[in-house]
Every structure is written in structure tokens, then in C-alpha cells.
Amino acid sequence: MGISIFGLGYVGCVSLGCLAKNGHNVIGVDISETKVGQINAGKATIIEKDVNEIIAGERAAGRISATTDGISAVINSDISIVAVGTPSTDKGHLDLQYIFRVAENIGEALKKKTSFHIIAIRSTIMPGTCDKFADIVEKISEKKRNVDFAIVDNPEFLREGTAVHDYFNPPLTLIGSDNRKAAETIAELYKQLPAEIIITELKIAEIMKYINNTYHALKISFANEIGNICTEVGVDSFKVMDIFCKDKHLNISPYYFKPGFAFGGSCLPKDLKGLQTLAHDMYVEVPVIDSINKTNEIQIQRAVKFIYKYWNKKLGFLGLSFKAGTDDLRNSPTVTVIEALLGKGCDITIYDKNINLAVLTGTNKEYIDSRIPHLATLLTNDSEQLINDCDVIIINTKEPEFLRLVDKLKGKIIVDFVRLDESLLDKNNYFGINW
Ligand SMILES: NC(=O)c1ccc[n+]([C@@H]2O[C@H](COP(=O)([O-])OP(=O)(O)OC[C@H]3O[C@@H](n4cnc5c(N)ncnc54)[C@H](O)[C@@H]3O)[C@@H](O)[C@H]2O)c1
């Protein structure tokens, strides 16, 4: 496959060398004559372990060259990889001027090209940018997307300092596309790499780098806040975080990583507050930790606001406790939602087979008595009857028995906090809380 790469910075230079090392012929394109000259002299444009040797070797083998002439590079290749910068503007928005200039360049080239061309965006871009890029190419080239050319998003996961190692050992290869054939052609470029290749929707691929990098920033800031608290209480933060990372069940794992409803229960809210108070007492500022509960409250308000749209309908809740398989109502965010909706005069029925008011004791009983004193009048022990009688069904927990009710749910308005079953998603009357 002949490949042209637009942008010979960190991503472009590493991709140029590594794709050539995997046997492809690659033409680098940059607006900088200096960078083009460096590549043609067999030198890397960046300081990075192993890149200089790779560029020198591949240039000597005749597999790489560079030019400032983007049009000839596109005409002489089947695939164009776009790796130009996408910096922030002064106001924090993405500056897409470099990306769109490449779109114009490729559009001009495609005017003169008859064979099918694939464009792979490797730069980090916001959802919707590939579509805008393709619109520019279509307008300038007068060619048609998915007839004469296709566009895919193929985000780069390398880190500076270990870029070559990361290129050959990516966590995964991600390709977003509306054109399966183009996605599979791009997947071929990476078939030697020891990583799963995931082909998905364009916008999912486009947003992925932002999610990853924001999470990485969150990890660093979280670890730093923990380090600051530990320092004040005379605990070695490195030992703490080493042990933290050894828990691969709940800490370093996919667990708790599902979007859905707010957290609650007897432990998370209490212990979060405990650590916040400890930090406060030590005069340690912990804005990341402090904001966790705020996000949780916003999620509860989101649910109230959404369900209240149906204020004049009969509302039925499947599940009341803070998660499936427990009767613990303490700090169940759904209790807060129901309390708010009752306060606004809504007609509510609740089914939760785990809740038996006669045997509720201690703090659990005190909690519910103080929040929904007449709970007994709202509870039913017949889930099917609740579905029959109510217009809007709110699914609060992922009880296995609710899965057996999926077919009965399909005619109702559904507000789902837990993504009970994928088959519900294609219904017009179905609303996930954040999907
Ligand atoms: N640097 C990283 O570690 C890294 C990792 C993953 C993803 N990314 C993303 O990849 C993209 C590129 O990042 P980078 O660090 O390689 O950028 P960079 O600034 O190092 O390189 C960009 C290059 O594009 C060239 N360029 C600008 N306009 C051009 C045009 N019209 N035609 C041809 N070349 C043009 C510039 O001259 C420059 O050499 C960004 O979106 C970035 O967010 C970067």
C-alpha cells in the first residue's frame, strides 16, 4: 500500500518510520521545508528513542521520502494519514485550521485522481470533525464520499519518550468508520502489531482520545491528592498507592466503569465524606475528591428532572435499594429521587423483592422512616401488576428477575438507570439515563 502522511511532527515522524519498517512505502508531507529536508537526509524531525535509526535505515532502503507537495503525495498513494497538530485556541477550543488545510489539499489532489482514496485521521479531533473534513474534500474535489474516497478516524495512543515502543505495542488499534472496507484496509496496516483491532463508529473513535487523556489526568490528580493527604498524616503515599494498585478486582479493573445512576449505599458516601473531612482538618485542598459528590448530586437531579417530565402519569419503580441483591436503603439515591418526586405530587408505586418493611431494622429502618415515612403504601409485591398499572417504568437495579420482564416492558415508557437489556435500546419510548 502506498501511504502519504501529512504532518511530520511526533506522530507523523514515528508513523513514517514505523510503517516503512513494516514494509510500506511512505511519503511524508509537511509545510516545513526544514522537516522535509531532514527526512530526505535520513534524519528524524524529533528527538525520540530509536526514531533516528529507523528513519536513516528506511530512507536508505528507499521506503520513505518527504515533500512539501501534498497534491503529488496524494496522487502517488492509496492512503493519506493525517497527523497535523490540533492545538487549543486561546479560549480552549480545538484549533482545526491545520486539519482543514490538509482537507483542502487532499480535495485538490482528488480532483486529479481517478482511483479510490482512503483518508485516515490520526490527529486528536472532536466528534464530527471527520464529517466536516469529508465535506471539504467533497466540495473541493467534486468527488463523492464512499464512492471516490472514504474517511476513517484512527487515533494514536503513543506517548512521547516511548513513542516507537508504543507504536509497536499499542494498547489497542482503534478505527472509526462508516465504510467497512476502508476500515479493514487501514486495519491491514497494523496487522503485525500485537494488539486487538477494534472497528467502531466514527464518533466513538473520535471522542476516545479525549476520554483516555482526561482519565489519565484524573488518575494523576487523584494520586497527587491522596499523596498530599498521606503526607500530612505521616503515611508513605507510595506504599499506599502500591497496595491500591494491587486490587485488580475493584480498583484497577473495569468494575464501576459503567455509566448509569448515582452511587449510594452505606459505604461510598460515608467514606468519601470521611476522607474529605480528614483532608479539610489537615488544611489539604482536594478539589478532585471534593467534586465527586457534586457529580453524584447532579446525577440524582438529572434523574428527577427527567422523570418529572411525566408528572401527570403513573410512575412505577423497579428496585429501590442502592443496588441489586440487597435491602440496604441507606443513602440509596433512588430514595432521594422518589422523595423529590413525591414532594412534587407524583403518583408512585415501587417494587423491590428485597425490601420487607416488617424485618427492616436499625439505621436502615431509621433512614427510610425519615425519608419516605409512608413507604408501605407505595410498595407492591407484584412486579407484573406494577408494569400493567403504571405508564412510566423506572428501572433502578439490575435484578435478574427484571430481565424476565423485558418483553412486558417494551410497550411502556422506560427510564433505565442500569442499561437492563440491549434489546430495549431500539425502542422509541426507551430512555437511558446517560446513553
Ligand atoms: N505528541 C503526542 O504524543 C501525541 C500522541 C497522540 C496523539 N497526538 C495527536 O496527534 C496530532 C499531531 O501531534 P504532534 O505532536 O505530532 O504534532 P506536531 O506539532 O509535533 O506536528 C505537526 C506537524 O504538522 C505539520 N503541518 C501543519 N500543517 C500542515 C499541513 N497543512 N500539511 C502538512 N503538514 C502540516 C507541522 O509543520 C508539524 O510538523 C495532534 O492532534 C495530537 O493531539 C499526539
Image (tube, grey):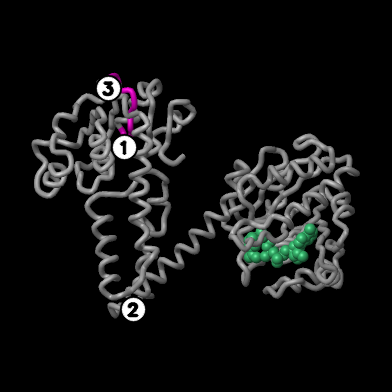
Residue 247 lies left or right of residue 9; in this view the side is: left
Residue 353 quadrant: top left
Residue 171 lies left or right of residue 1; in this view the side is: left
Q: What residue is pinned by disc 3?
A: 384
Can residue 13 be seen in this snapshot?
Answer: no
Number of numbered tags placed on the structure image: 3
Nearer to the camera, 280 or 120:
280
Q: Amino acid at mark 1?
A: Asn
Instruction: Please identify the residue farthest to the bottom as the structure is shown.
Output: 234
Nearer to the camera, 398 or 380:
380
Residue 188 lies left or right of residue 310; in this view the side is: right
Q: What residue is pinned by disc 2?
A: 231
Residue numbers of the magenta segment: 388-400
Can residue 22 be seen in this snapshot?
Answer: yes
Q: What residue is pinned by disc 1?
A: 396
Nearer to the camera, 7 or 102:
102
Q: Residue at x 28, y 66 (%)?
A: 275
Q: Residues within 10 Å of mark 2 (few under 14, many from 20)?
A: few
Residue 68 image offset from top left, x and y in percent: 86, 62
Q: Amino acid at mark 2?
A: Thr
- Whether the magenta-drawn stretch holds residue 397 is answered as yes
Nearer to the camera, 339 or 198:
339
Q: Residue at x 27, y 55 (%)?
A: 269
Task: Find ligand 1 in the image and state its quadrant.
Answer: bottom right
Label 1 close to label 3 by CB (< 8 Å) = no
